[in-house]
Image (tube, rainbow, N blue to C red):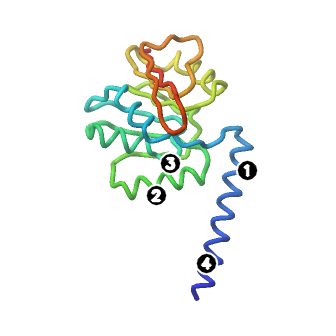
Amino acid sequence: MFTDFLIGFVVVVTVLLIVTFAMNIWLRIPSVPTPLPIVDEMVKLAKLKNDDRVFDIGAGDGRMLIAAKRACGGIVAVGYEMIPTIWLIGKLRIFLSHTDVTLRRADALKQNYADADVIFLYLFPAFMEALVEKFKTELRSGTRIVSYMFKLPHHEPIETKKVRGFWGEATVYVYRW
């Protein structure tokens, strides 16, 4: 009985890993979790306020959404993740955290961010270029954008913060649209 369970578990995990790997190649977007010290710093730099609408584009396992909601319980937190297995891990993580956040499996470029107060980003520059074009038509003045590692093309940050950790030093950029 236990052997059957173990074999089934190994098969399921193997299939999930294959699907994740295939989606990473197909989408050309690797799934790299944001280190928790960076998450904490990004949440601080966002200067969240109750009633803020917060979006995490490429939300991965939901850690940014959970941290933001825990830091400021009055926000509405929504994330988008394309890779089904990563989205599923995020849904499980959110469920286990008992936080009221939303994680959708959807293409971030097809969403509307007109009501965003804060947007979190950890995306490669090519994807950010497409987002900047989208933001030009959708974002209202004053929207705060907090980006880890990669700068928004053609925009100067209002603040930068170097964060040191076991991975070395990384930069978080803050923009006001």
Residue at (43% x, 22% y) in the render: 161
Q: Earlier in the sequence, mark 2 or mark 3?
A: 3
- Callout 3 secondary element: loop
| Distance in Å between CA atoms under marks 4 and 3 | 25 Å
**Image disc number at residue 128:** none
Residue at image mark 1: 22
Q: Residues within 10 Å of mark 3 (few under 14, many from 20)?
A: many
Q: Nearer the viewer, mark 1 or mark 4?
A: 4
Percent position (x, y) of residue 109? Answer: 59, 31
Q: Are marks 4 and 3 in contact (CB under 8 Å)?
A: no
Which residue does the numbered mark 4 point to in the structure image?
6
Could you tell which of marks 2 and 1 lies nearer the N-terminus? 1
Give coordinates of residue 145: x percent, y percent.
Answer: 45, 23
The residue at which mark 3 appears reads as 61
Residue 147, given in percent of the width and then of the height, sits at 49, 26
Whether 21 is drawn above or below 166: the answer is below
Q: Which quadrant is the C terminus positioned in?
A: top left
Amino acid marked by disc 2: Leu
Image point (50%, 10%), residue name: 156
Residue 84 horizontal side relative to residue 176, left or right: right
Specify which label sits upstream in the sequence, 2 or 4. 4
**Residue position for label 2:** 92
Residue 148 at x, y percent in the picture: 51, 29
Q: Is residue 156 above or below residue 79?
A: above
Q: Quadrant of residue 7?
A: bottom right
Disc nearer the start of the sequence (1/4): 4
Q: Are marks 3 and 1 in contact (CB under 8 Å)?
A: no
Q: Earlier in the sequence, mark 4 or mark 3?
A: 4
- Residue at position x 34%, y 30% in the image: 44
Asked which quadrant contains residue 67, the reply is top left
